[in-house]
Amino acid sequence: MSYLCSGRFAIYLAMKTNLLRRIGRAFTLLELLVVMSIIGILATVGLRGMAAAKEFARRAQAHTDCLNFQASLDTYLTDRSNFPLA
């Protein structure tokens, strides 16, 4: 009888009702599928953006290589007064 009147029973009852509330709030299959599809769409958009940035970086590197080659030819021309053969 003292167990029912003590604070332990109130804590036990509160934990049990909290557990029952959590079980009632579980995600449904439809909600999980919607979340998974949204994540998939966001991943696709992100990967496309990464691919575009990678292509931009590749073109920028090629442009820089061309500028460096032009600078080296200009230096060679300044030193030797003619362009290299071949």
Image (tube, rainbow, N blue to C red):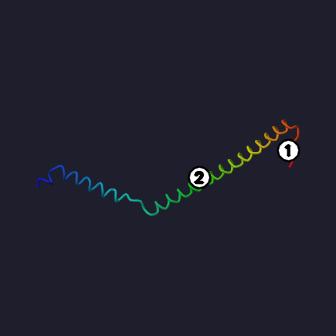
Q: Nearer the viewer, residue 84 or 24?
A: 84
Q: Secondary structure at mark 2?
A: helix
**Which residue: 53% across, 59% down?**
37
Tell me the kind of residue under disc 1.
Pro
Q: Secondary structure at mark 1?
A: loop
Pointer 1: residues within 10 angstroms few (<14), some, or many (20+)?
few
- Name the side, left or right, on which 52 lies relative to 63: left
Residue tagged by mark 2? 46
Residue at the top extreme of this rendering:
78
Residue at the left extreme of this rendering:
1
Tell me the kind of residue under disc 2.
Gly
User: Residue 82's spot in the image, x, y percent?
Assistant: 88, 40
Residue at the bottom extreme of this rendering:
29
User: Residue 54's spot in the image, x, y percent?
Assistant: 65, 50
* Vertical position of residue 34 compared to residue 11: above or below: below
- Name the side, left or right, on which 21 lies relative to 37: left
Q: Nearer the viewer, residue 24 or 3?
A: 3
* Vertical position of residue 63 compared to residue 33: above or below: above
User: Residue 31's spot in the image, x, y percent?
Assistant: 46, 60
Q: Nearer the viewer, residue 49 or 3?
A: 49
Pointer 2: residues within 10 angstroms few (<14), some, or many (20+)?
few
Q: Could you tell me which quadrant the N terminus lies in?
A: bottom left
Residue at the front extreme of this rendering:
80
Label 1 vs label 2, nearer the camera: 1
Residue tagged by mark 1? 84
